[in-house]
Amino acid sequence: MTFDASHLISATWIDAVEHHGELDSTQNRARAAAAELPREGSLLVVADRQSAGRGRGANRWWTGEGSLAFSLLFDPTRFELPRRAVPQVSLAAGVALVDTVAPVVGDHPPGLHWPNDVYAADRKLAGVLVDVLPDGRHIVGVGINTNSALADVPDELRESIATLHWLTGRLVDHGELLLAFLEQFAVALRMLAQAPLQLGARFNELCLQHGQVLTVRNGAERTTGRCAGIAPDGALLLDTDRGRRAFYSGTLR
Ligand code: BTN
């Protein structure tokens, strides 16, 4: 994969770019790099392949030939957000991802599964993992299934994931996709800082799970209910036997 790192730096809010042929995980590399960088500096780490890509929870993330995998290290105060962990940053990343891929996928409008999985044609197209460092800096990791052919996807994933190539028959330019995401993410983070309820409303519009029966797992606790959408503050709303419950974290089953 080729892209112009200096153009990304001059055209966006990113201060430095690392492009690796292979890493275990861009998330791990960004975490290691954070120790050597000034707190106010932002870094984009891109890898063509990941040997141990991480998903949310205990999941792994497949990064095949032709996938786009990257992590962004930044200080949220850059966007006038508080330095403490901001759970809605992960929602902002999901909204930004949808706005990035929507012009590419055309006939297959993408949407969101809470907290930030991007789906198109009923299959998972992209995912986001957010790590927060002890000093408050965020590492937002994004994996997008871009140019892989479905034939090259591992058997166990072939029925459940979409790639942009499978959806459109075309190859996408990773540099253009990165540029678009960085712009859209900045827009979403500013919305989060200035009009957070608007971001929740946008997420609710994009949420594909309205009316579905979902189970949220939080540690040992499991709660099942019918999805009533996303609250303005970003919580997942479930109508359960005991009334409406709001979830700010947890994994879905
Ligand atoms: C999920 O859907 O479970 C989150 C997937 C996040 C994958 C990305 S790929 C780039 C970054 N590096 C990783 O190891 N994981 C994230």
Image (spheres, rainbow, N blue to C red):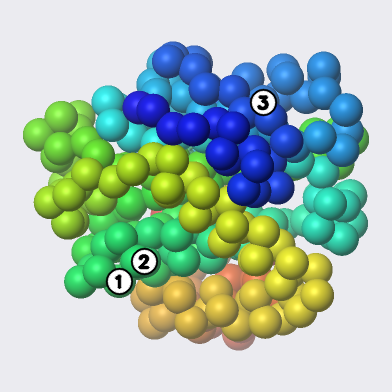
Residue at x-position 63% and y-position 20%: 29
What residue is pinned by disc 3?
30
What residue is pinned by disc 2?
102
Given the image, on which type of amino acid does mark 1 rest? Pro
Q: Does the residue labelled 3 lie within 8 Å of ligand 1?
A: no
Residue 237 picture location, percent across and down: 58, 77
User: Are dots 1 and 2 in contact, CB under 8 Å?
Assistant: yes
Q: Does 187 sit above or below residue 70?
A: below
Residue 22 is marked as none
Q: Can residue 115 be seen in this view?
A: no
Mark 1 to mark 3: distance in Å? Answer: 31 Å
Left or right, 87 with respect to 167, comes to right
Q: Which of marks 1 and 2 is nearer the N terminus?
A: 2
Mark 1 to mark 2: distance in Å? Answer: 6 Å
Q: What element carries label 1?
A: loop
Q: Does 183 sit above or below residue 224?
A: above
Residue 240 picture location, percent across and down: 53, 79
Residue at x-position 38% and y-position 59%: 101
- For the N terminus, the image quarter is top left
What residue is pinned by disc 1?
109
Q: Earlier in the sequence, mark 1 or mark 3?
A: 3
Crowding at label 1, few (<14), some or many (≥20) Cα neighbours within 10 Å? some
Given the image, on which type of amino acid does mark 2 rest? Ala
Q: Does the residue labelled 1 lie within 8 Å of ligand 1?
A: no
Please state which of residues 200 and 181 is positioned toward the viewer in this rendering: 181
Given the image, on which type of amino acid does mark 3 rest? Ala
